[in-house]
Amino acid sequence: MKRLREAAVGAWEFVAGDDWLTAVGVLAALGLTALVSDPDEAWIVMPLAVAGLLALSVWREARKRDRT
Amino acid sequence: MVSGQAVGLVVSVFLACAVEAVEALTIVLAVGATRSWRSSLLGCAVAVFALAATTAILGPRLTSLPIDTLRLVVGGLLLVFGLQWLRKAILRAAGLKAQHDEEEIFREEAEAARAAGARHPGFDPYAFTIAFKGVLLEGLEVVFIALTFGANQGRVGLAAVAAVAAVLTVAAVGVAVRAPLARVPENAMKFSVGVMLTSFGIFWGAEGAGASWPGGDAALLVIVPLVLLFSLALTRALRAGTAEGRVAEA
């Protein structure tokens, strides 16, 4: 059980890296796209979400470095 | 005829693999030059074999998934990896994160190797382990990129060829110059890989989640430049912010 948990934590760290918020945001954006009922309108969700996530991620990191 | 997606696959995998191979080469050279070439190269070879085996085992399993599930998983993974590559490349380009200095890393690795105790005359476990770990860790992300890109297009073989070509190119240059490849524009390469992974991630992720792109595959011709322009705009805004901060401090 302990090894399974360690493997799961290792896999999550490998995928999410040092920015888990972006990984969660990507999952949420994919979920939101799936929820939009019209496929011809659903494509807009991903570009907007990714732009927001990238800007937020870069801004957070820049602010962190400003403080140190 | 070669499709745009196939070109994207080859360029992304080649660049991602080349940049990670440059970093792995620095580690292999450092332990090889200071401890044992034989053990260092053996560690490198075993790691390459493990990465190839991972590709061979996971590749067919991924391609057997239903196409929508595959696109959703692949799109999500490419986005998570791509946004990480892009964020770090933007921060480096804006001067907020130190550039990857291969000569400095070579010096640090060589120093650690010298401090690691007596060298074994035959097989040197330290050189083997450091080279093995370095190549495996640098290569694992590339394997995932190659697998996800390749599986989604049913072209794992083409992705593997691009990856092998990148490794052979870096290895050949490394053997020729016998030094870390400090002049390779690593950040520009990482920036390009980040843009490609993010763009294809947006495209396939949305398709996998049920969306239809206006113009079909041609939408990629708009997504890639938009992601690039947005990333360059972020870099510029960060640079301006950093310069303003410096002026205010002065």
Image (cartoon, rainbow, N blue to C red):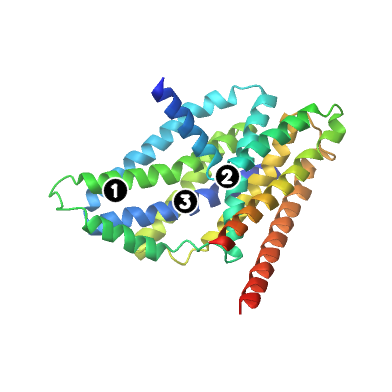
Residue B32, quarter of the rendered image: bottom left
Point 71% across, 41% down: residue: B202
Single out the mark in the foreground, 3 or 2: 2
- Image mark 1: chain: B
Local crowd size for mark 3, using a 10 Å CA cut-off: few (<14), some (14–19), many (≥20): many
- Image mark 3: chain: B
Tell me the CA gap for discs 1 and 2.
34 Å
- Residue A26 rendering spot, x and y as whole percentages: 67, 38
- Residue B228 rendering spot, x and y as whole percentages: 70, 56
* Number of numbered tags placed on the structure image: 3
Query: Of the residues shown, which amino acid type is indicated by label 1?
Result: Leu
Vertical order, B19 against B148 (above or below): below
What residue is shown with label 2?
A19
Tell me the CA gap for discs 3 and 1.
17 Å
Point 60% across, 55% down: residue: A61
Element class at badge 1: helix
Query: Of the residues shown, which amino acid type is indicated by label 3?
Result: Glu
Q: Could you tell whether B139 is left or right of B131 in the image?
A: right
Query: Of the residues shown, which amino acid type is indicated by label 2?
Result: Asp
What residue is shown with label 1?
B41
What residue is shown with label 3?
B20
Single out the mark in the foreground, 1 or 2: 2
Tell me the CA gap for discs 3 and 2.
20 Å
- Residue A11 rendering spot, x and y as whole percentages: 49, 33
Q: Earlier in the sequence, mark 3 or mark 1?
A: 3
Q: Could you tell whether B102 is left or right of B195 in the image?
A: left
Tags 3 and 1 both on a single chain: yes
Local crowd size for mark 1, using a 10 Å CA cut-off: few (<14), some (14–19), many (≥20): some
Point 72% across, 61% down: residue: B233
Pick the front one: B247 or B83:
B247
Vertical order, B5 against A62 (above or below): above
Q: Look at the image and tell me in which quarter the N terminus of chain B lies.
A: top right
